[in-house]
Every structure is written in C-alpha cells, then in structure tokens.
Image (cartoon, rainbow, N blue to C red):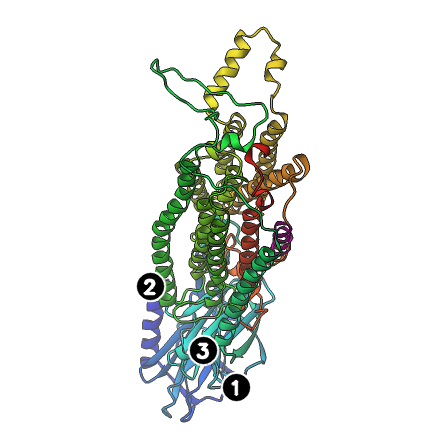
Amino acid sequence: MAAFSSRCVIVAFFLVHCYTDGHQSGNFSQVMQFVLNSSNNTRIHFHPGYVKNVYKINAWSTDATSKEPVYVVVEQDTNILSWTVPLTLANSFNNTDNVYDNTSRIFCDNGWGRHFTVTLSTDSPTNVTLYLLVKKEYNFNTGDKYSVSVSPSQPDYFFYRFSSNQTLTTVIRVNSSSDLCLFASIQNHQCPVFNLEVSRSVHQTILHKGAMRIRRYEYGEGFSLVLVARMDDSDCIQKYNPLDKSVLRENSRTSHVTVSIREINGNRTVAIFCMLGIIVVTCLVAVLVVCVFHMCGKAAGGTRYDESEPLLPRTVPEEQQDDGNERRERTLPDKLMVSHLAQNLQNNSDKSFGYMWSLLHVGIFYGLPVTQLVWTYQKIANKYGDEDMCYYNYLCANPLWIFGDFNHIYSNVGYILMGALFLCMVAHWKSKYQGLSTGVPRHYGVFNAMGLALIGEGVLSACYHVCPSQFSFQFDVTFMYLMAVLCMVQLYENRHSDVSLSTSHAFMILGAFIFIATVGLLTNEVALVAILIILEIPLCIFLSLKAYFFGPVWYNLGNLISQLQNSEDSTLHILKPQRKARFICVVTPIAINIVLSTVGCYLFVNGVVDFGTLILIQLMGNAFLHTLIYFFFKIRIYREGVSVENVFYLFLSIILWGIGGHAYFQTRTQWTESPAISRQRNEECVLFDFYDVHDLWHFWSAGALYSTFMFLLTLDDNVAYKNRNEMAVF
C-alpha cells in the first residue's frame, strides 16, 4: 500500500508539472464539475486570504476506475497533499482492497495570504467526470451538537477554541448510530492536519459511544478533532482484548456521528477536599460511636493471667514422638470448651502477630513493583496518546498531574483512612481486654493484619486505577483475597487457639490461589476453572476434617480406618460422628463450596464474571458462610447472645454493603470487553462533577469493610468476662 501511494505521488507530480493544460480560479462552498482525460488536466487556484483556515476538500467521480484513477494534488508552498479518486484502501481483516468513489481530505491553510492550488489529472484516454467541493470548516461552540457522516475515505474535522480562561478540562462526546468502528484523534491546532489514523496524537477507537477529556494547558488556545471510519471493525472488538474473537461487519462503511463539547470550569480542589472532609468527619463519628457505647456499657472485672503459664493441663491433640518414635494423641472430652483449646496463649499470640508481619512484608514486596509498573503504563499512555490502553470512564475521568483518571485513584483514600482507624480501634480493644483470663482468647495480630490489608487494598486499588486493564486487574483484588482469608482465620482462632492454621500454611494456600488467578486472568481458559475446582474441593474437605479432629488429619483418619478393620462394632456405629453439631459445622461448608464452584463455573463459562472475580466470589462466599455459622451457633445453639454494639455494626455493615453493591454493579467500564465496547458503558459524574458511581463504591465499600471488621472485633465482647470452661467450642 505504501509503495502504491508513493507511485501515486510521483505520477501526480509528473502530470502536474508537465501536462497541466487548464488553469482557473476556484470558488469556495460551490460544487465544480470537471471533464478530464490523459491530455486534458486542470489546475484550480483558491485564494483564502490572510486568515488561517482549515478546508475540507471533497472529490468524487462515478466513472473513474482504480486502474486509471484521477490524481488529486493540493499544493501550498511546501505543504502538499495528494490522493486518488477512486481511493483504494487495504482491508487487513480479510486481505482485500476496498474502493471508494467519494473521497475527502482536510487541508490546512497557513494563513500567509498565499493561494493554494488543486491539480486534477488522469491517465485515462477517455473522458472522466470529477466533482470538486472545497469548503471552510467552521469552529465548534460549547454546548452545540454537530452531526456529520464519515467513512474510511472521508474523514471529518472540527476545531474548538476554548471559550474561557477558567476552563480546566473539556469533555468531547461522540455518538454513532451504527456499529462501524471509528477512529477519533485530538491534534494541536497547527498545520498539517493528519487526516487518517495516526499514533502521534491522543486517539481512541469508538463504536456507539466515545468520550475524550482534554486538559487546556496541553493545547493552548484550542484543539482539532478528526474523525474517520476504520476499514474493518477488528480494532474495536479485539484491540487489547485478544480473548474476544468476534468481529462486526457492515456492508456500508459510512457512519453518522453526533459530536458535542462541554467545558468544565469547576474547582477540582473543592471536590477533592470536600470528599476528604466527609471521610474525616465519618471517622470522627465512628470514634464517637465507640466512645458512646463504652460509656454506656457496664464495667466488669476480670482476672489477669500470666500468658507464659497454661490454665489447664495440656489436652489438645498433638503429634509427639516418644523414645520409640511412635505417635500418640492425647484425648479430648466429648464436650469441648474454649479452655481446652487455649492452653498455649503466648505461642498463639506470637502466631497471631505473625500474620501481621507476614502481610506487611507481602505488601511491601508486592506493592513496590506494582507501583513501578503502573507508573510506567501511565507514562507510555501519555507519551503515545493511545486511550485504548486504559479502561477509563472517559465521561468522568478527571486528569490531574500525569494521571489521566485522578478521581478513581483518589477515591481509594477511604480504604486507607478506614484501615488506619481500625488499627486504632484494635489498639484500644487490646488495652481494654488484653490480659484477661476470661472470654475467648483475642488474637490482635490477625486484627492488625486485617487493618493493614484494608490499607493495602486502598493502595493497590489506586495502582489498578492508574491504568485499568485485564493485565492490572489482579492488583485490585489481591488484598480482597487476603481480607476474606483473614476473616475466616480470625473466626476460627476465636475458639480454636491451639489448633489454628499456621501463618506459613495460610499464605502458601493464598499464594496458590493468587497464582491460579494470575494465569486465569492472562489466559481465560475454562480448563483452569476445572483445575481450581479440583484443588479447592479437596482442600476444603481437608481443612474441614482438620477442624473436626482438632489435629493431624492423616493420623486421625488412620485411627478411624484401624477401628473399622479391627472393631467388632458395626460400620455405621463407628462412622457416627461423636460431635454432631461440629460435624454439621464442617459438612455445611463442603456442600456450599460445591454449590459455589458449580455456580461460579456456570457464570464464568457464560461470560458473566472473569476468572479473578470468580475466585473472589469463592473466598468472599466462604468468609460470609463462616461468619453466618459462627453467629448462628453463638445466638441460637449456645444462646450466648451479642452486645448492642455488635448488633449496631452488623446492621451498619449490611446497609453499607447493600448500598455499595448497588453502586458496584452499575459498571462504567468492563475490561473483559474491547475498549470501544467498554466505552458504551461510560456515564457522566454524579457528585461534585468529579466522582462517578464507582468512586461512590470505593467510599461505601470502605465503610462496609470497616463495619464488618468492627463486627468481628466486638462479636464476643459480651462474653469477655465469662469463664472459658463455660464457653463451648464451635
């Protein structure tokens, strides 16, 4: 194609300078008809005056052929523009050439008062009729809507001059009535104008809806918008999304487009600090709520203990080796109490704080490369102007500094502040309840890890929103995985201090899930879902058996098999669970995990959720399930009751999760689709002309997570001074 264009230009120059027969003056905004052949060519002079203007030159013919086309050459000093009528463009999708009889180009006059010349020539020995229309392109006005038609051979051009010195950002909306793939580019108001697809300007692909946000300081007095239809739709469907194999096709490659422009003069500082003020006030209210509950609560005394000494003789199951290297298991009573599994409190406390330090290390070594990567993404996107790299809501993507979507980055400050507030609350609870020999053993290290994970979610979610895409989505959900796992660990450790999962094992299991999620996000293969289920169900069964036996699974299963082989009792009698309530507790999660896996697989295969979200659903579902089981046994089975403060946080978290979920499912982007299709979800800002519904999801979910963590922190406050040998294990 490039070689063909070069030959066209060479032939055109030869014809212009050697075989030009006719000279005449041209008229703007008037259709002119010319009859051309190989011995009768025409040169038309246009006199634009001393004002810098941009002209659209339309040329069309019904009897010119691609073998013997009409050459159109536009000259003004050293500025030269040339093309052929009909215009032949290569279709890379099906490896064919498309021929267009109607053509147009944008020509920029330098404004020096010199005329420009349009030369028409052809090699055809027979007469060819060509029509020419040269008209000045008019400037855009704020708030007006302009309707145009564009095709691969007929781009269109708009110039916009900023109307106010107070303008910070200009929003361009492009709407199309067809399914054709369009290419929109923003250029500085200078000559020459790049008519077709160029990578040196800010540009994006568009299907039905497109939007671009322009910062005034980058374009001086104004900017130019160029629209052109693509030869095929593959870039609008597959660009940066190799998972989608479908391609839209239309026989007609002419798209009817409506363009509108709106200026934003509001002060972004007000929007930024107003939201920060709202979050800070919310934190102060949260502190006030705690103070009110503690002032209204009844003080009670408790006995302090020495963490280095056990309260009762050691009775938990453990693997020990005697002189004969034989395993043995110490027996447990049929009715387990918290005191039976809270014998080594100092070691359990150290293990609990191991979660905090491990998470801190993971956050540092995971977060630094992520920050470096997304910073590089943003610099590349800014340098090359490719707005298909990042999945923004361009109708509410407020640029600031080097960031193209600052509001979605900044709105994560709620996670950070709420995480810091929760750490303060944990410190307060520790000072109030630490050292009691009553109530459930409190593992403040896990609670601290939950607060750090909430802060980490804010940082990593901000990194994801620097340049959202399928390659960075994992950054947004990793710490959500961590928080879900920590919630389950905390619930289990409440009444199983001596037999809880070690830090290293917990992070190894979590690392395996994150590895599978990474591979799944990159490949999106259904086979990985099968692998996930194959790994998850046995793991769930193993952990459930470990929870039931309170110790080594294989050792206890070996004893059970030995009893089946040697005992004279019936098989049903031996297999009958001794702790029926506990058996229900461990069987229920297995059954529900099978259901979750089945439903998740169905949703993934049908394209409802992506692989990362599938794993998040599994982990969040398990966290909710364990919370529900714990709460049910505490309230209904053992009738321990809960405090008013705990009920308050329960209902608050439900309300905030409901409001946040409503905002979350109003998606404004979707990286599982192509950028052009994703933009059809873009919508305007809803708060301060700065934040959209996804920003509100950040705010609501930060409050919801804080309320959920406070619910877990206060869950056993009402039994803080109850003897442990009177509290059941469940």
Give the mark, 3 or 1, whose residue is nearer the N terminus: 1
The residue at the point 58 percent across, 66 percent down is 683
Residue type at the position of mark 1: Ser
219 vs 642, left or right, is: left
The residue at the point 47 percent across, 62 percent down is 413
What kind of element bears circle 2?
helix
> Which mark identifies residue 3?
2
What kind of element bears circle 3?
strand
**Region of the chain picked out in magenta, as a range:** 644-657
> Which mark identifies residue 224?
3
Instruction: Please state the horizontal and vertical placement of residue 60, each as a whole percent of the image.
Output: 50, 74
The residue at the point 47 percent across, 51 percent down is 431
Closest to the observer: 111 or 56? Answer: 111
Instruction: Mark 1: give few (<14), some (14-19) or many (20+) Cα within 10 Å.
Output: some
Q: Considering the whole magenta stretch, tell me its main secondary structure.
A: helix
Instruction: Please state the horizontal and vertical placement of residue 289, each as a whole percent of the image.
Output: 59, 59
The residue at the point 61 percent across, 50 percent down is 646
Instruction: Please state the horizontal and vertical placement of residue 164, each as a whole percent of the image.
Output: 49, 86
Q: Magenta includes 653?
A: yes
Q: Nearer the viewer, mark 3 or mark 2?
A: 3
> Which mark identifies residue 29?
1
The quadrant holding residue 217 is: bottom left
Q: Magenta includes 652?
A: yes
